[in-house]
Image: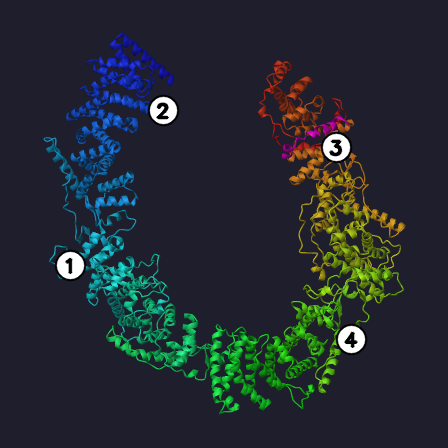
Amino acid sequence: MTFLHNECEQYYVNQILAVADANDHNSLHNMLKEYACNINVGDSQCSDSRVVRKVTEVLRSSGGNLSLATCCCLVLQRLLASRPCFEAVKNMPEVSLALTQCVHSANFVLSYLAAVTIRAAIKFANETAAIDTASMSKLELANKGVFLSADNMQQLTSLLHTFALGNNKALQLYGILQTFLSAVSSPTYELESARGWAKIFEACVLGSAGIFCNLCRSKSAVVYCSNTLFLKIVLTQASPPIASQLQKVCLDRAIILIYLKDAIFANDEATRSRSGNLVYLMIEGNKVSKKLLEALLPKGVMHLYTTKVVQMGSQREETANRFSAWMEILDLLRKDNFLTPILVWNEAKRAELKKFLSDEVEAFYAVAENNKDLLFNSSEMQLTYVSASEGAGSIVDGVHLELLVDHQPAADDRRIEFWKLRDPLSTFEAVLQAMVLGFTPLFGQNNLPEVDLRLAAHVLSWIYERHAEDIQHCLGRLNVIEIIVGMLREVIESEHQVFVFKLVVFLLATVEIGSKDNALRFLSAGGATILVPLIVLALSKCCRDKYAFECDAWNMGDKKYSRSHETVLVRHLDGQIRTVRVPSGRFYEVLDKAVQDGSLDAKEGVHWQDDSVHEKLQLGLALDLLEAIMRLSGIDSNTQEFPPPVACSHLSKEELLCHLVQILLWAKGSVFGRILDILAYVVRVNVAAMNRLYKLGAFEILLWKLLAGDLVDSDKACIVGFIRQCHLLQDPDSVFNGPDYLKAEEQFPWHGSILRLFLPEGVVLKLMSEGADTFTSTLNSEHESPEIIWSAEMRERLLDYLKAELEPFVKFRASDPLALYIHVPKAPLVYPELSESVFVAPFYVENLLDVERFPNYQINDPVTFLNSLTLELRKCSTNLLNSGSTMSATSILRKELSRIHLLLRAQAYLVQRFPELPVPGDMESVVITLANPALRTCLTQKDESPPAVVDILVQATTILRHYCKGMTRDLEVPQTSFNFALSILSLSTNYEDGEISPKDVKTSMTFESALGGALLVLGTIASSRAGKEKLWGDTRWKQGFWCTLVSAAEDAMAVPSRGPSPVTFAALSCLKYFAEDSSFCDRILNEGWYLPLLLLAIPSADVVLKSNDSKSAVLYSSADVLGSLVRALMKANSTQPHESVYGDMSRLIPRPLLTCLLQEEGPEKFITAVSSEFMHPEGIWTCEMRAELLQGIYERLQLHNDGLSEGKFAMDDEVGWLRAFDYECLSGEVRAEGLYVRGLSSNSWEGFILPAGHLYINVMQNYLQLHKAHLQVAATEEFEVPMESYSDEKNKQEAPSDLEEFEEVLKESDFPPVPTNATNLEQHSGPVDNCLYTLSAIRECLKHAVKEGREDIILNFKHSILSDIILSGHSLLEVQVELASIVKALAECKVGQDVVLHSDLMRCLALQLWQSAARKAKSRNDQVLMSTLEAVLLLTENMSATVKATNIFSSCGLLLPVLAIFCNVDLPSLFKEQPYLGNDAVEIPIPKAGQLWAAQILGQLLLAGAGISRRTKLVKDLTFWRTGSNASDPRHPAPVEGIEEATDMYELLNIIEQGLEENVDPVVLRTMVLLFPIDFLTLLAREPSKAFDLYESQHRSPRLVWDEGTRLRLKSRIEKEIMKVRDSFMNEGLYAVPSWAMVAQGRPVFLRWTVANVVENDSRPLYRDSEDVDYSQELYLGGFFIDQFLRNPEFDFGMALEERFLREVRKAIVMGKVNGQELDFDDRRRLLLSLLLLFKLRPPLLLRHSNFDIFFPVFDFISGGNSRERRGLTQVAVLLFHCIATHSDMADCMSSEDLMHTLASLLDLKVPASVAGFAGTDPRLCSLMLMLRLARLSSTAVEVSLQLNIISKLVKLVDNNVDSALQQRAGECLAVLSADKRRGSEVLKLLNKLIPKDRKAFAAWNIPVSDIRDEIVDSKTLKHFLQQRYPSSWWVSDSSDGFNESDTESAGPVTIVEASLTFPGA
């Protein structure tokens, strides 16, 4: 269309030029009209600018021919839309001249068209042209300079003026205005290069501004609209001076009024929008214009505009946002009505404004017609609305007050803007002035409107709450707060309570919103003296019963279960009743939550029109004001300031403070808590005020409220907190006077509490120490504890006392609410219940010491309590000393006994519970002073002494012991305590001529506690060096202490035992200090002090110990002291190298027992060990030894006591007796280099480590070598050579001394019980036992050598000794068990493993395992069997993962018995006769645990042979063996399922092949592979327990075939191998243990013969053990059973095994061998079928492999061999070729002449009709399928087909009506051949020759190739191949007929399964 359009236009242009040259005006006119009619504006593509000049010449010469001129203008307008013409017109000034002249035409059409043409010349109109904007802007600017030059613009503006004065000139005006619009809206106006033209244009416009103003009154809509748009663009884009001048002109000509009227009242939306925009531009930046608008519109309009601008967040320069706000205001003025405080706008106002604007404009222009210089007087313009304030109301400063405060809309209401005051400060000042004038007598004498004082106060609050920042500065300037306080003072007691309420609301707002200065102004004005009485009066009005203690306006019992805030009902003036919340302070109000019950806040709930206010509301609001002032004063802060806050100073005044205190009695609920908080803060910051509280009755009031007041728990907590704050800071005169009080107050502040006037001391301390809840509950309940004694009677007594104090004040207050409390001094309240109690802060002593009622009562501050007790004891001591000169001790005790006893008990109790308490310096003197009378009394009265007197001594010793702990120094002891304790100790002895008779020493049971205490004091003194020396040299101590120890020992040895006394423990504690000191240990041994200690530490055999009895405690303490003595001996002997580390003490006590004492839990371990029996390498302990030791000590002690009776106290021969002591019961023990052999064999090696060297090992091995005959069953003669004779001097010299080995502290471990030796020694005696012990000892030494890394001991082990014994065949069963244990021990380390693996021990294990499994009649054979299996298993688990290591098990013959045990094959005995098997013997089968362990051994061998180094121990699923001690065997941790590494036994074949290449024959792995399937071996390696279960079950899958037949074949073969090995044993002897492996076997043992064909649904094939007709040997490839796969082809291998299976099949096909044997017919057939099944059921396998490597081997299958085998495999092979031909490269390689010839020969077969068309029985169809695939993918196949003339054979198949399926497939082959790109044309030519003309209609080759399906073999065909060994039974020869018709009967019916799989690449 564009091409045709261009041709058309070019035709017209050529015609115009030709006609113009011919001067044929008529033809030219017609041609111009045709051009104008056919070429649209903006579509011109004219490239010849000459036509413009020609048309212009015609226009200029048109004369009066208006039609021709009009056509010229139209043509020029269209031509200027082409760029060449538009660009050339600037060089044609005649065009501009001609058009300008036409604009002056009187004809309005010509004038308009000329103007439009000028517009086209300055504004390019072709929008479809691809033009650069910048270049076009330059062209437009150039044209403007020509067409809108200064002269032309002057002419055009003159025309505007001329046309404006005339009528019917709208079209001309519109054309000129549109031209001007195009000029100013063009982008050239913004270019810098266009500024010159722009200045000319602006000057022209400004000079003609009056003309444009006149056009604003045009009645033509188009002229008015165009003029408006022109003014808008000029005001927007002109320079600021020009725009400002234009604004002034519009203002002087009243244009703003015209557009304001249209902006508000025009009906058209576009007109209103344009007018409003223009008005905005006229007032923007022009103050005069804006002032005019403010004079015309109501005051609220411009305020609303400013508010909207602020809301938008716009700045002054953001014109767009301000314009948006302006347009919104105009829209509101047009359609909305307003009744708001700052704006009243309705229809009447709207009509008035409209009329005013119209009248003013008409009046101005009516006068301006006669006076052109007339200007509009805008500065004095003012519109006064006569209806500015309709309705009643108070108007102040132009604001409707009632509307302002009573009708405020919601926050989301769009009218909310009208409630925002223009000048809040001005309005506030005006309302304040009105209120002041109304409050004073000046009211009525001024011109202000009448204002209700309540409304005025309410308005002031309303304004201040919203505009506090604007008003705050005037509060001080105008003294607003002072004025309000003055008003409040005048009306506080008047009936104008609403006015009072509103004044308080205002004051509250100023304090809460304003700064602290407002609160200070309020206080300075005397606000506190007004506010506190207001609270008192309001609270008084709330009370109905004036004589009640508390106000009855609240019921706190109901309040507890009501809402969280209190409400009252308020009736308003209009009769409406609303629920109003009582102000309850910010701590009690529900903040930031919506009130769900619809209640109102008090400020909102009380209207200013109401006549009254509820008293609770007035009270709550006044409290809010007081709280706000206190918050500003710092009530919420914990900081201390000086001077105190002004508010506190004002409230601390006597009268106000008294009011605040005394209204607490009235107050309830939240009012009480608020007042109390304020009062607490006032007295906290003003101590002077706090000191006066008691004079104001504060404590009486608060205690009464706490006991009987109606308060909630939180208020009670506040009371308690207040009392705790103030009770200690009252004036001293209020409590007590005198120096004693002041001195006590310094030490114990509670003495200065004012509460002592009302409460007991314990309750006061409870207040000081506990929380509020505890104190409150204490007062309201009964308590009797060490801290408090408080009962209901005491509470009632206190309550009566308080009522009597407060009743006078209540009566006085009833008549005068502002009455004050009068203080009268009073005496403290006395409680008779406490008259007998002894109180020592903070406890009542008698209750504290009552441990049965108050056991372990908590003492929070023991130091303070100790100081209190010490102070009381000092008083008693002073009184005792003062009265000692005049009174006897008995009299003194009788007078002060009870108090002294109680105080001493308390202090003793305290120091016992808190031993770390500091010691007062005078404690010793005070206590001894108080205890001396008791000591003297005991000395005089002895057994007749009162118990309390003796107990005083007990408590005194307890205190002195604590004192001595703190005061005893290394070189200094407290002598007074020392003498006092010895004085008590002397009470335990009788003095008769200086001799001591121990038999008569009996300590009175009355003095035992005191005696024990004295010993503890002496023991504490003995903790220092000086104390021990002082005591050891004091005869009194030795005599008394020895008597005490002897008495304790006699009590322990007594039958029955008398039980220990406290004296025993004290004596042992004292003795320990001496035993710990190495310098005293020799003295203890020399003087025999250890004798009674040993009697106490070693219990007799008949003692039964219990965990918590006293006897066990004595044993523990004695063992502890003995341990200290042993450690001291070790320290003392450490400097003597030739002495034992334990000294001579080891002669009495074996070293293991002494070692127990050195460990952390020594005493417990020692007691356990010494009370039992044990065998240890370094010592043995039995009951006989214990009895022998105790008897010897007792006899020695008797000798010592006899010497004491004779007056010989000291003994100095005890060391000699100690060194000469020896145990007779150990004379027969066997030792090796000082070590007990029985101890070594016991496995009880706690603390023992192997000595250096191996001399002791050699001794024991030499002993065994000589006596090994005793370890054989055939030995009959017993003889023994002492073991000491086997150690030579050389070894003795090399053996180091073992004394230094035990100097370090040995490792801790539990001391074992007496071992149960596994060797069953009780049936032997004499040398046999010693040999067995020796063998066990060697085993334990090897075990510990492995643990300790002693390789020298392991390498020194002479295993040949043990091998000789075992291989003799006559070893004891115990020896066999020991062999297994030794192997287990050695298997734990690498050196030990090497020793076992490369020694005869492996042959021993094999022989032992064989024989133990064969001897089934002996019950103990199981132990040998299981221990041997465990040893072998541990060895296989730990040995290195190498083939060489596993081969050792084969070479030593160990593999065969393990296999036999696992397979449950009977092993025959290796002996000719079995003497152990009698006639009545019962065959005992091999335990299942043994079979499982054998499975684990085989699995470990597999893992090791496969190179798995990180073999973990598998789950040992044992039923009876892993019980008892074995269950905790550290070698068997928590069971772990499976193994850590993935173990793939399918790689065993690769390992075997690799081993053969490396000359390391993996015989074990090869043997296992021949015996078991690979999958079975995988399970055996990974999970032996499951393999064990599988062995006895059956399983059939392509991975594993295992059933009873397989199991029997395996057992049979193993039995044969066993018999061969047994014959070797019988012939060569037991020493010649033969190696065994199955390495010469060809096929695996488990393979059988199976049916060759797969019968339908045959998942369990038939097997034969030998070859048979129609049976073939199982095909087993790399661990996969091919026959089972053919029966279950859908088996899920998993991706990895699936790939492996395919690889194995391909490998067998390529190599042509299976297990080293050539493939036979059945093998080939099964391999080909396996591949077909894999490719059909697993298509991805085709895509992942090229499969080219199998083509040639398979082709050999069908090209070689005999003819019958070829015919049996041809169809399967051809279909396999069809599957693997997946891409063109593969097809090219396969398309050889041989293959194609074979396929062609198959087409010549004469297939019987009964079996034709089925791929399973028709080879032709198989050939066609492959041929189709090859032809589709390969041009080579097409070329070979042409060469071999296969086309003709295909044509015959198509032409002959043999079978439809065959015909279709042959036709498809022809179609594919014809479609070949390279040789397809030749195929078509050949077909045209071969196909007769009458048959060409068939045209099989015309089938679309895309419609031909090319599928791989279907399931029906595959099933036929599986069921028939020879698929085409009719095919008996290789000839073309190859078939006898009679043979078709044998084919039989074929079951068809409809299934196919489309080949993905076809």
**Residue position marked by numbered label 2 in the rendering:** 132
- Say the numbered circle drawn on residue 1618: none
Looking at the rendered structure, the kind of residue marked 2 is Asp
Numbered disc 2: secondary structure: loop
**Residue position marked by numbered label 4 in the rendering:** 1220
Q: Earlier in the sequence, mark 2 or mark 4?
A: 2
Query: Is residue 390 left or right of 824 when viewed as pictured?
Result: left
Query: Is residue 419 left or right of 1169 when viewed as pictured?
Result: left
Q: Earlier in the sequence, mark 4 or mark 3?
A: 4
**Mark whose residue sits in front, 1 or 4:** 4
Q: Earlier in the sequence, mark 1 or mark 4?
A: 1
C-alpha span from label 2 to label 3? 79 Å
Q: Residues within 10 Å of mark 4 (few under 14, many from 20)?
A: few
**Residue position marked by numbered label 3 in the rendering:** 1711
Give me the residue at 70% from left, 56% from top.
Answer: 1531
Depicted 694 relative to depicted 1925: above or below: below
Q: Position of residue 334 (x, y in %)?
A: 22, 41
Depicted 1532 relative to depicted 92: above or below: below
Q: Position of residue 1781 (x, y in %)?
A: 65, 28
Which quadrant of the view contains residue 148?
A: top left
> Which segment did they paint magenta?
1740-1760
**Residue position marked by numbered label 1 in the rendering:** 437
C-alpha span from label 1 to label 4? 128 Å
Disc 4 vs disc 3: Cβ atoms closer than 8 Å?
Answer: no
